[in-house]
Image (cartoon, helix red, strand yellow):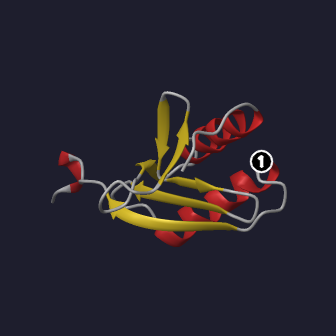
């Protein structure tokens, strides 16, 4: 896939930042083999797919986060950034519990 530039890159970066700002999201996840990504000049954003038809987000959630609630919050946060595109959220992994969560 060729690198994307300009407005597309800005949009992808804003979408990634919005996802990471959602409570419960630990990180974007590139999939089992790191294949899920948007390619930009000199860099890539793992865990994001974006084209004219849809937006796909793959995430790791924090230990104890409600997955359905977190996915819903991601879709809501992205609504103003995706111009009405459907947003599919895939929870790929759950982060390790903190020491205080291991009882």
Residue 12 found in image quarter: top right
Vertical side of 65 occupied by 3: above or below: above
Residue at 45% across, 56% down:
36
- Looking at the image, residue 19 sits to the left or right of residue 25; the answer is right
- Looking at the image, residue 48 sits to the left or right of residue 11; the answer is left
Residue 4, percent from left and from top: 64, 39
Q: Nearer the viewer, residue 68 or 60?
A: 60
Q: Quadrant of the C terminus?
A: bottom left
- In the image as oriented, which residue stretches furthest toward the front? 2
- Looking at the image, residue 15 sits to the left or right of residue 53; the answer is left
Q: How many numbered discs?
A: 1
Residue at 18% across, 47% down:
99
Residue at 56% across, 66% down:
89
Residue 11, percent from left and from top: 71, 40
Vertical side of 49 occupied by 89: above or below: below
* Residue that numbered label 1 is attached to: 81
- Is disc 1 surrounded by few (<14), some (14 to 19) or many (20+) residues within 10 Å? some
- In the image as oriented, which residue stretches furthest toward the top? 42
- Give SS at disc 1: helix
Residue at 33% across, 61% down:
94
Q: Nearer the viewer, residue 62 or 91?
A: 91
């Amino acid at each position: 896939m060729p690198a994307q530039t300009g407005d597309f890159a800005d949009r992808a970066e804003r979408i990634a930042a919005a996802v990471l700002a959602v409570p419960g999201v630990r990180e974007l996840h590139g999939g089992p083999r790191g294949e899920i990504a948007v390619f930009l000049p000199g860099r890539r954003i793992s865990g994001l797919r974006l084209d004219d038809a849809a937006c796909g987000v793959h995430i790791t959630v924090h230990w104890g986060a409600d997955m359905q609630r977190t996915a819903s919050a991601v879709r809501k946060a992205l609504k103003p950034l995706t111009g009405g595109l459907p947003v599919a959220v895939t929870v790929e992994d759950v982060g390790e519990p903190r020491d205080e969560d291991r009882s």
